Image: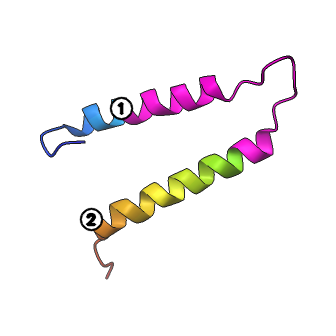
Amino acid sequence: MSESESEDEILDRIEAALRKIASLSKPAGGEALDRATLAEGLDQVINRLRTAIDEVHPPEPTE
């Protein structure tokens, strides 16, 4: 991700990545999808992304 990317371009890249994750998470051979495990994994990824973003751009202090 470069500094020259607009916010819309970044959001498009995130959406594309999430779509790819969802498509790869479909079970093969008729196995049941463990939605809880998938949701937990996505939550971990989101938390890691938030932490990385906060390290680069710390949140503004609230008054």
Residue sitting at 35 percent across and 29 percent down? 12
Total labels: the figure holds: 2
Which amino acid type is shown beneath numbered disc 2?
Val
Foreground residue among 56 and 28: 28
Magenta extent: 13-38
Is any atom of residue 57 visible in this view?
no
Given the image, on which type of amino acid does mark 1 rest? Arg
- Label 1 sits on a secondary structure element that is helix
- 49 shown above or below 16: below
Residue 55: image x %, image y %?
A: 32, 69
Q: Quadrant of residue 30?
A: top right
Residue that label 1 marks: 13
The residue lying at 77 percent from left, 24 percent from top is 27
The picture places residue 38, in percent across and down from the top left corner, at 71, 42
Of 6 and 34, which appears nearest the observer? 34
From the viewer's perspective, is residue 59 above or below residue 48? Answer: below
User: At x 61% / y 46%, what residue is drawn?
Assistant: 42
The C terminus lies in which quarter of the figure?
A: bottom left
Q: Residue 56: which numbered mark, if any?
A: 2
User: In screen coordinates, is 4 left or right of 52?
Assistant: left
Q: CA distance from mark 2 to mark 1?
A: 19 Å
Left or right of 2 on screen, residue 49:
right
Q: Is residue 52 magenta?
A: no
Question: Image height check: is 23 above or below 57?
Answer: above
